[in-house]
Amino acid sequence: MIWPFRPYPPLSLTHKVQLERQFRATAAAIGAFSKDVPSIICPQDLDPVLQQVTEDLLPQTLFEFFAKRFFSTSEPTPAHPSVEWAPISLLNTNGQAQPFQKHLDDEGRISKIQIDSELKQFPYRIASIAALACAECWFRNLDQSQQVTLEKVPFDVLPVFFGTTPILANAALYTDEQLMGTMHQMESSQLGSLSALEHGYLMSMAEYSLGFDYSTVMHLLRPDASKSLKAGLKFLQKTKDTILPKDLRSDANQLQQPPTENELSSRNDTIVLSSLMDLGTTGTCPTQLTPILCRLLGHSEPEIRKWTASTLRSATELNDEQLSDIYASLGDSSTTVRAQAILALKPGFDRDEDVVDRLVDFLSRPERSVVEASVVKLADYADFPDRTPEALLKAIHTLVVKGAADSVFPIALKLLKHFTEDPEGLLKERFADDPTIYSTLFSNTDPSADEFSATDDNE
């Protein structure tokens, strides 16, 4: 895939597609394609406000400034929360100090926002917090069906439809170097969940599909956001490698179409991956799509192979040819693809003996997700080679040391019962010099197994 952010992509294909899906879902939920395109608000537009307000009133004044943009006179406006300073020692979420904290009333609406008083010297960060707070207030003013649609969309996405994303982009705390080539992690110090690069790509999507004029303020953005906006827009216009139509206003009816074989066969990797995500959301694998899904197991993009294998876990009917395709994926270069392929296998295959033999071999692998998936899948079979008990003991040690899900251990114990009437005694003998292993194994005695995500082990 041609990627605009060279030499390294700051977002993986999965992350790019998820951001586009969040943009599309938000556009549909709020009817963005039927609204007028608002003017763009830049940090410089805040200067007159900042020059006229006293420090004590700064948080509330900035909130009111953005509220005028988010809530038009034709829309019901909720009661505005109080926005005030507070010492950082009082701002605590899940045991960590935060730059701001929201308080909700009994109806689940924001009643008060407290901002770290040490941020007084950073007025544009305060503006970013105010814009995010307005976005959340606007969200909580939606009807329940719209809120359910958007419950997994970061509030940071909403401002792009109101022309206020430059404020968030310039105040974002992530830097270009922190993102290059990696999936970023949440930090307690950040003001939102998106980076400046992601805000830049959101702005390019808004211009590409809804006709916003974000590129006219490109020169006023910080370098990484400006680069992302410029490169992202050029990328979309040149490759059309996106799930968004060129004119979302006229093609809004495309938003809710179920995945088809044509989409899964697309030369556009973004469309293929988004279609796989749609199937994952439904938790189904339609029989008519199984052949094309099995072909996708050989796709050059590892993230497409990963999502394909995961989707095939939901397949209810697989013939020997299709199971052979899944079996071949056990040799994939991606740890996550291998783990998902293991979980997609079904008993009844003419090579079941080979499958079990391969899974027992995997029990001695160092990758936690592969070992975990192998234990779970072996529980679906009844006949095992003689070396299985020793392999299971190695697997148990690996799973304990690498922090596997608690629900996998009862499955491992149940498998050991195929070979000994006293699995607990066998474990006590094997791990006599390491009581931590034994105590961990029996801290969860629930014999049922949760679904496993089989995620990457630092590939």
Image (tube, rainbow, N blue to C red):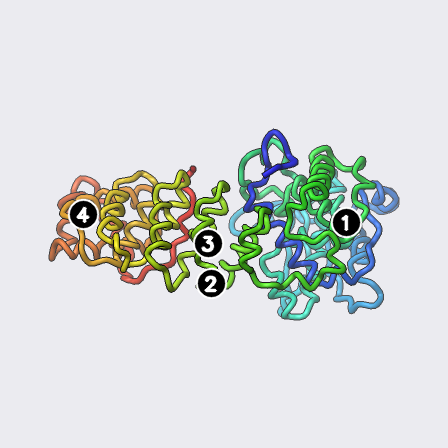
Q: CA distance from mark 3 to mark 4?
A: 32 Å
Of tags 2 and 4, which is closer to the observer? Answer: 2
Q: CA distance from mark 1 to mark 2?
A: 44 Å
Residue 35, percent from left and from top: 80, 61
Which residue corresponds to the image point at 83% horizontal and 46% vertical from the top-left? 54
Q: Are marks 3 and 4 in contact (CB under 8 Å)?
A: no
The tag on residue 388 is 4
Image height of 212 relative to 285, above or below: above
Q: CA distance from mark 2 to mark 3?
A: 10 Å
Secondary structure at numbered mark 1:
loop
Report whether residue 309 is seen: yes
In the rendered image, which quarter contains the C terminus? Answer: top left
Q: CA distance from mark 2 to mark 4?
A: 37 Å
Residue that carries the numbered disc 1 in the rendered image: 164
Residue 400, percent from left and from top: 29, 45
Image height of 122 relative to 280, above or below: above
In the image, what residue type sits under mark 4? Thr
Residue 172, percent from left and from top: 67, 41
| Residue furthest to the left | 421
In the rendered image, which quarter contains the N terminus? Answer: top right
- Between residue 134 and residue 254, name the one nearer to us: 254
Q: Are marks 2 and 4 in contact (CB under 8 Å)?
A: no
Q: Give the mark nearest the N terminus, 1 or 3.
A: 1
The tag on residue 288 is 2
Which residue corresponds to the image point at 36% horizontal and 60% vertical from the top-left? 318
Q: Please state if 295 lies on the left or on the right of 208 as rendered.
A: left
Q: Are marks 1 and 3 in contact (CB under 8 Å)?
A: no
Mark 4 neighbour class, 10 Å CA radius: few under 14, some 14 to 19, many 20 or more: many
Mark 2 neighbour class, 10 Å CA radius: few under 14, some 14 to 19, many 20 or more: few
Residue that carries the numbered disc 3 in the rendered image: 293
Q: CA distance from mark 1 to mark 3?
A: 40 Å
Q: Give the mark nearest the N terminus, 4 or 1.
A: 1
